[in-house]
Image (tube, rainbow, N blue to C red):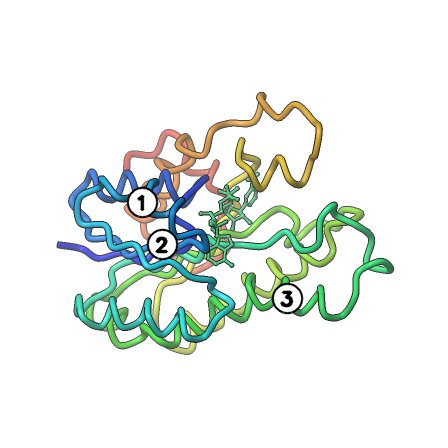
Amino acid sequence: MPVALVTGGSAGLGHALVHTLSDRGWTVVTDGRDPERLAAAVGGLAAVVPVSGDVADPAHLGALAREVAWLGRLDLLVHNASSLGPLPLRPLRETSTDELLDTWRVNAAAPVALTRAVLPQLRTASGVVVSLSSDAAVEHHETWGAYGAGKAALDHLTLTLAAEEGLTGYAVDPGDMRTAMHQDAFPGEDISDRPLPATVVPHLLALLAARPPSGRYRAASFAGVPA
Ligand SMILES: NC(=O)c1ccc[n+]([C@@H]2O[C@H](COP(=O)([O-])OP(=O)(O)OC[C@H]3O[C@@H](n4cnc5c(N)ncnc54)[C@H](OP(=O)(O)O)[C@@H]3O)[C@@H](O)[C@H]2O)c1
């Protein structure tokens, strides 16, 4: 049975992906900071191992790595859990250094630490690393600096790790999705025209099936491609 580790599986895109992988017979380790929400979201799914905690906490990353070590292989590592940074989104001149570092710890440093911790199991399975990026990693929107810089770093770190370790790595922009994170970024706005995260999952699976060279991709480029 293939094994995946998907961070942030209790809501949004992570939740939709965990559901689909479980339906397809994968064993999935996943997390989220709120233990009750995580249990409610994935408790009924087959072969899903919930480990609640914050990816910014090294002890939690150790707990995730122990689950993966016990399973013995890792076919897919998805860095999905993410922070927008201080809310409401604000210009960099109003963002403290500690707020920047907290955002980058979740969005960039934690994925590196987690990848490092599960390298043996990724190697065993010739596994793939997917990091959920954003258009904010390559475009420069007012008030998106802390988040966007974290995503730019995430892209760079994911693809450098892939090159250094001989892994396949993808930084994937999923596009706008109707999720809590998106609503947090646009408080009070009607976001009902944004696609649901479940619509992006087939694009991610099509990317994995096509297995192009490591690089940065837009999920929408895989629309209509068989998964
Ligand atoms: N939504 C969009 O329009 C959009 C656009 C471009 C890129 N993205 C990217 O797509 C990915 C998924 O976003 P989403 O909109 O699906 O997010 P979401 O709906 O806010 O869900 C985030 C998930 O991650 C968990 N999480 C958040 N911080 C965590 C932490 N520090 N440690 C562990 N788990 C944590 C949350 O649970 P807890 O809160 O309980 O921890 C939740 O399960 C993110 O990487 C995001 O940057 C989203």
Note whether 189 is above or below 220 in the view shown.
above
The residue identified by callout 2 is 6
State which tag comes first along the sequence, 3 or 2.
2
The residue identified by callout 3 is 102
State which tag comes first along the sequence, 1 or 2.
2
Residue 80 position, x and y percent, is 45, 53
Residue 150 position, x and y percent, is 63, 61
Residue at 71% across, 65% down: 100
Name of the residue lying farthest toward the right: 93
Point out the image quarter for the N terminus.
bottom left
Secondary structure at badge 1 equals helix
Secondary structure at badge 2 equals strand
Q: Report how many numbered discs are placed on residues in the image.
A: 3
For mark 2, does the 10 Å Cα neighbourhood hold few (<14), some (14 to 19), or many (20 or more) residues? Answer: many
Note whether 26 is above or below 3 in the view shown.
above
For mark 1, does the 10 Å Cα neighbourhood hold few (<14), some (14 to 19), or many (20 or more) residues? Answer: many
Q: Which mark is residue 18?
A: 1
